[in-house]
Amino acid sequence: MGAVRLLRTLVPLVLVAGLAAACGGGSSSGASPAPSSTALQLRPVYARYTPGAPSVDQLGPQAPKDVADSLKGFDCSSGSQELQGMLMTCDGAGVVFLLKDPLTTGGVSSAVARHIHGEKLWFVKVALDPQATSTLAQAVDTMPGTELALVVDDHVVTAPIIDPSMKDGTLGVVGDYDEQQAKALAAQLSRN
């Protein structure tokens, strides 16, 4: 149970990173996705589809029928695509996301793999630089409750909800990471 409590504590940290991406606000239907980048991007979620979930939980934010149909028909193995000027991509669990333009790209001051005490799982503690922290803090004020995707190499790493705990620019990227995976992700994020 200690791991569950720690994960619950870390989730708000992940949300902080998500806020930085959410600062774009509004619809970005006229904009195109940023080119593929290995740098961390914080992107507001326009819509989400979770295959296999109960129908009431499959779709995230409300989406027009044509967008929902595109999300439902998307093959995650095909790589990312553009849809209505937004980036359509997936996370490791096969959840399909339609993402607005990035609030920020890069902006990682440090990323360190950390062990969850008493468990086999690891997470990555990310500290954003002052500019990215400021962008995220603005998103916390203007976009509370918005889902924010942390994207690396056009792949959603996690998608927390923007929360006031993110204002300090520190977040925890929590997943089913073992030591090697957490250290690899931390190294990738540190290069940004």
Image (cartoon, rainbow, N blue to C red):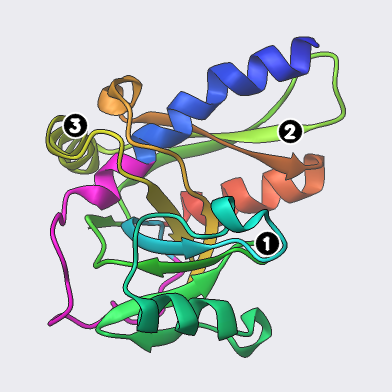
- Residue 86, picture quadrant: bottom left
Query: Does 93 sit above or below residue 185?
Result: below
Badge 1 element:
loop
Query: Quadrant where the N terminus lies?
Result: top right
Q: Nearer the viewer, mark 3 or mark 1?
A: 1
The magenta-colored residue range is 18-38
- Residue 182, picture quadrant: top right
Q: Nearer the viewer, residue 88 or 190?
A: 88
Q: Is residue 34 magenta?
A: yes
Residue 105 % position (x, y): 29, 59
Question: Which residue in the structure is indicated by mark 3?
Answer: 137
Residue 7 % position (x, y): 64, 23
Residue 92's disc number:
1
Residue 171 % position (x, y): 44, 31
Residue 122's disc number:
2
Q: Nearer the viewer, residue 107 or 171?
A: 171
- Dominant secondary structure of the residues highlighted in magenta in the image: loop
Whether residue 87 is visible to the viewer of this picture, yes or no, is yes
Query: Does 69 sit above or below residue 155?
Result: below
